[in-house]
Amino acid sequence: MRLLPPPKYVPLLATALVLGGLFVAGAFRYENFGTLGNVLGTIRGQAMLGVVAIGATFVILSGGIDLSVGAVVALTGMIVAAALPSGVQVVVPEDNPVRQITRDQLRQVYAGEITNWKQLGGPDRAIVPVTRELASSAHDSFMKHVMAGRPLADRVQYVNDDSEVKARVQGEAGAIGYVDLYYAPRGLGRLMIDGEHGVQVGLNPALAIAMALAAGLAIGAGMGCLIHFFELPAFLVTLAGMFFARGAGFVIHTRSIPIKHPFFLRTVNEDLVIPLGGHLEIPLAVIVLLALLAAALVLAHWTRFGRNVYAIGGSENSARLMGLGVGRTKILIYTLAGLCSAIGGVVWTFELQSGDPLQAGLGMELDAIAAVVIGGTLLSGGVGFVAGTLMGVLILGLIKAIITFENINSWWTKIIMGMLLLAFILLQNFVTKASMRRKKT
Amino acid sequence: MPEDTGLRTLPSPRRLPAWAGKLLWPVLALALLLAFNAVATPNFFNLEIRDGHLYGSLIDILNHGAKVMILALGMTLVIATGGVDLSVGAVMAIAGALAAMVIHVHAWPFAAGLALVLGVCLLAGAWNGMLVAVFRVQPIVATLILMVAGRGVAQLLTDGKIITFTDPANPALIFLGNGHLLGLPFPVAIVAVMLALTVLLTRRTALGLFIESVGDNETASHFSGVQARSVKFMVYVFSAFCAGVAGLIAASNIKAADSNNAGLYLELDAILAVVIGGTALTGGRFYLVGAVIGALLIQTLTTTIFMRDVSAHIIPLPKALVIVIVCLLQSPAFRRKIMAPFVRRAA
């Protein structure tokens, strides 16, 4: 008679028990803990880690390790933020009849060559050009895309932000100024430049996101190739990938880039959500996580690729002798992990409306490994479940939530996570030994 | 001309011992980098004496590289047994936090505080060693636990605050990272002593041989009478000890215990230094001097970038390229597939 389920399900069962136990304990102890709102909030808070950990699950199932995930999240978030359109809109007082000029005319105005609105088809009125302060992003963008290397005329007036530009332009009949592309110029007239709403460069959101995903794919594939073709240890190659991606993020920009595009501010938060009635809704980040989870479940359990992953994790040599495409599968695994990290980076831009080369994905590689291990996947590879990883991610989220509810210091998260890791690893060891003993007898 | 007479495949007498061959690449890379600086960075090789102490970029490299050099000593032995120690950064944070608490806040005598800090580090190492040697947990995972939890413990010790000890009430603690000995910064002296002791202990006793044999083949070592478990246990204890010393220097350098950032990512630099030094991640032969040169190479690269007025944040990028190039040069598969036309066939 067997009291225990098959050994490979024991860690998964333990994970489910811990998850359920934490939730029930929290729900009994704190008001509002068991509410749908809190549950959704917890899942939303862990969505980014979840996306990344799903990719890490495949890597660990195959017996490898990926330390680059956090840095790739940062890099791809930076790519999205930097690729979106940036620039300026040119504004004049509302009663100014001029509504259209060319970029050349705009340059001549600020270079001091055109000084009267008459020259632009308007009333006989001196032009008073206004510019944003030095080193502001609007100023940099204006100098680069409009002035093209020419200096501003001496009589151009400097002001310190967009609302000061607005005040100055409204108070001066002949004024012309420029504000950030995403500033709402209410109470001002906006000039069309060469038939466009301002001077801007950049890609639309879909292309920007596609570029970020392609970068993640490329980094993953590159690491996979180094690991497979040159038989380098995954540990070192993905360590190099981590350094590479962090450095590359800083090459794009050394500080965080805010995202002001309406797609990220409005569409993502208002239109691309599933409303649940009341104030509740399933945010896009969670939808992405669930969709990716479904795809990963199919990939792991119902495709040849998935079976190859398990086979390589069980024994790479046996897999090779069986004639499985070990090399191709390994490269695909790291490519998939790179893609998942890139999706994580895109989710970061959805959730935080910025790209951040320093803070994004900081320490996420270890959180992801911890979530995978707590989710019941053996670090030696071959045994584990994608669904378990989601539970691991949620356990980490519940621990964070409980620590917030208890109002104790956040470093306890790290200590508790360490203890949980230890418990699960010892459990895995015990289960592995038990199943080996059963095989022998 | 006949294709292959077979004669050339006979082993040719080696002129150099194995360690000299392994040191060739890192020393060459370091020399190249220094040569680049000699041409491109003005005043790079200038040394001046102020108050009887030497100052200059070269001294800075030695001084700032001391932490990774010390970590690399312990990491070399761990990697030689086929393991890896990810917890050194967290142990550094614990050491700094504990030192600041007992010596600065609770005003213990320096010697007592030092003994306590190093004792706790030995305990941390024993914890890692127990998990690896007794419970047979994979080293990456076993040390991952302390890496995650250790930083939490360090924050717990300092109550999440950064503890500064700038006042001269702790001359000994401040001397550790800022003092001078014979004109050189004191951390450099610590590195020299620890390197000499480690080399003596591993090369003048059978200990080094035991470590290499465990890394090569644990089962065979066990059957030849080598206490594989004790050897593994000891290298983790030693690694944590090195991390403790490095943590004290790190805290002393900035005269503060910063549990969040002390030693952050230094485990990766230490591993990189060991690999550049010629020790394979799979274990076996180890090269202590090579690891120290690897650490120097990393620090020289960092200093070079700093002196060229490039944003310090970009430093990971060239580091990544160095890792990949070094790994490729050492990879047998790479030599076979790409370098074959350029490399003389080995005997």
Image (cartoon, coloured by chain):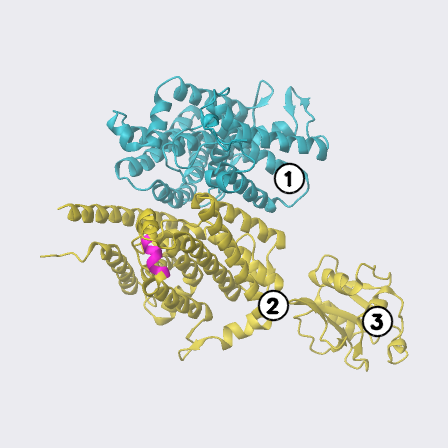
Chain colours: A yellow, B cyan
Q: How far apart are marks 3 and 1 (CA)?
A: 43 Å
The percent coordinates of residue A119 (x first, y second) are 89, 76
3 or 2: tag closer to the N-terminus: 3
Residue neighbourhood size for the residue with mark 3, other residues' Cα within 10 Å, grouped as few (<14), some (14–19), many (≥20) = some
Q: Is residue B139 above or below residue A124?
A: above
Residue marked by disc 1: B306
SS label for mark 3: helix
Q: Distance between the residues labelled 3 and 2?
A: 28 Å
Which quadrant does the N terminus of chain A fall into? bottom left
- Are both tags, 3 and 1, on one chain? no
Mark carried by residue B175: none
Residue marked by disc 2: A260
On the question of residue A253 being in view, the answer is no
Q: Mark 2 lies on which chain?
A: A
Amino acid at circle 1: Phe
| SS assignment for the magenta stretch, majority | helix
Amino acid at circle 3: Gln
For marks 3 and 2, give the one nearer the viewer. Answer: 3
Q: Give the range drawn in magenta.
A: A305-311
Residue marked by disc 3: A105
- Which of B321/B189 is in front? B321
Amino acid at circle 2: Lys
